Image (cartoon, rainbow, N blue to C red):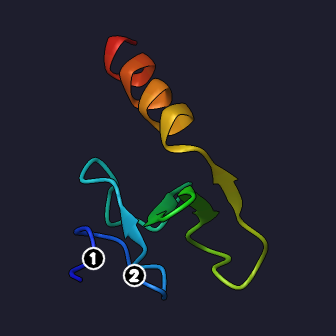
Amino acid sequence: MPTAPGLTSVPLWFKSSYSGGNATECVEAAFVPCGVLIRDSKRPKHPHLTVSARAWSGFLNDARQA
């Protein structure tokens, strides 16, 4: 059975297209079956946050309206 796009056993981290190339204050996200992982791009080995897909969607909607 094929898996859903973007869902893998190893998180595929990405940065926002709004992130600058200056390596300052950036977060990365990865889609996983339980939701979305969020981490500091400058500290990829440190702990990350896990949020539900619903919480991530709400965050993105609020950020777009700001």
- Quadrant of the rendering where the C terminus is positioned: top left
Q: Nearer the viewer, mark 2 or mark 1?
A: 1
Q: Where is residue 20? Give x, y as percent.
A: 32, 57
Report which residue position mark 2 lands on: 8
Q: Disc 1 residue type?
A: Thr
Q: Residue at x 42, y 32 (%)?
A: 57
Tell me what residue is drawn at x 37 percent, y 21 percent: 61
**Earlier along the polypeptide chain: callout 2 or callout 1?**
1
Q: Secondary structure at mark 1?
A: loop
For the N terminus, the image quarter is bottom left
Left or right relative to 37: residue 66? left
Q: Are marks 2 and 1 in contact (CB under 8 Å)?
A: yes
Classify 9 as above or below 51.
below
Q: Which mark is residue 42?
A: none
Q: Residue at x 43, y 74 (%)?
A: 13
Q: Position of residue 41 (x, y in %)?
A: 55, 70
Q: In the image, 18: left or right of 66?
A: left
What residue is shown with label 1? Answer: 3
Q: Which picture quadrant has residue 30?
A: bottom left
Residue 20 drawn above or below residue 52: below
